[in-house]
Image (cartoon, rainbow, N blue to C red):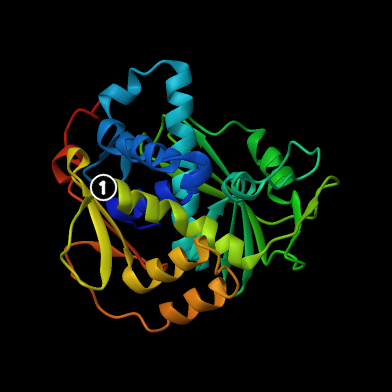
Amino acid sequence: MLTFSTDDLVHALFATGRAPGDEVSHGLASVWEFIHRVSLIPAYVRRSDGGGLVKSALARELDRSEKVSLSYALGQAMTGIFCQKKLGVTFLLHVDRYAGRYGVTFGTTRKRADLFGWSPRGWVVAEAKGRSNAMEAALPSTLVAQKRSIKSIAGERPWLALGCVASFPPYAYELLIDAVDPDEDALESIDVNMDLDRYMLAYYEPFLAAVAAGTPDVRDQGYLASRFDVLNLRVGLRRDIAARVRQAAEGELVGLHESVLGLLETGGEADQSFTTFPDGTLVGSNWADAMSLNDWRY
């Protein structure tokens, strides 16, 4: 069983977003993407009596293209939660965010995994899928090809490659997560020449952009935080990590990866009114009323 909170879901939706956080080149694109993705939760997702995730009545009335968009976002987020909770992946990043930030290309293959992240045991590569109904029988074989599409990252073979599917099978109606075990490399597998410092900068820039875009909210001196009142949401980042990431964005990039890992080892306790994460970020959502609506019942 995979147990998680609404704050975990918000954090995963943010961390797995595709839009780069580089404000110079992309403005506040990552913030708008973040707001769009997290707003899907109170609109379309509910908690069942047993605690599982179910689709709201509004979600069931979406047209096909809208359902695909919702399923895609949930698939990404649930893969992120699975990787953090079960595999210890602290920094899970969408491949396109890194590629878009630094103009990286990955060859001609179209079977490229969505997400990759660093963990103490090595790199994890994950392909995420979402389905508004049951997972089709042929999908696991597609995942096998995509999850092994990255042969190495920064010269290291991934510790683990997996595929995750988030689906709503009619017989269960609650969200189910299926994980596909590792397999051999695909024929078109590629090497990703990763720079760990740039990777860390690409990971944290959207958090800084979100804090800058929201209304400043100081409740804990250890965190730089802002609130988004229309969403009943609070987002933040440890001040020491925020300061180091800003330095990197301004040109002092070398050593960022090691600096952040060192700072995270010295973390302290924070206000318990929000959820803090192993990456030094925080999320505080107040969606109990929205998530408990009974409009999901058939």
Q: Nearer the viewer, residue 116 or 180?
A: 116
Label 1 SS: loop
190 sits to left or right of 33: right
Q: Is any part of residue 169 visible from this angle?
A: no
* 208 w.r.t. 196: above or below: above
Q: Quadrant of residue 207?
A: bottom left
Q: Residue 152 location, x and y as percent?
A: 76, 61
Q: Quadrant of the C terminus?
A: top left
84 sits to left or right of 220: right
Q: Residue 196 location, x and y as percent?
A: 63, 67
Q: Residue at x 28, y 63 (%)?
A: 224
The outermost residue toward the bottom is 266
Q: Quadrant of residue 61?
A: top left
123 sits to left or right of 83: right
The outermost residue toward the front is 250
Circle 1 sits on which residue?
214
The outermost residue toward the right is 187
Q: Nearer the viewer, residue 75 or 193?
A: 193
Q: Residue at x 67, y 45 (%)?
A: 103
Q: Residue 11 location, x and y as percent?
A: 37, 53
Q: Residue at x 39, y 69 (%)?
A: 243
Q: Residue at x 67, y 67 (%)?
A: 159
Which amino acid, by three-letter code, is at mark 1?
A: Gly
Q: Nearer the viewer, residue 176 or 7?
A: 7
Q: Is any part of residue 155 visible from this angle?
A: yes
How many marks do you count on the picture?
1
Q: Quadrant of the N terminus?
A: bottom left
177 sits to left or right of 62: right
* 43 w.r.t. 31: above or below: above
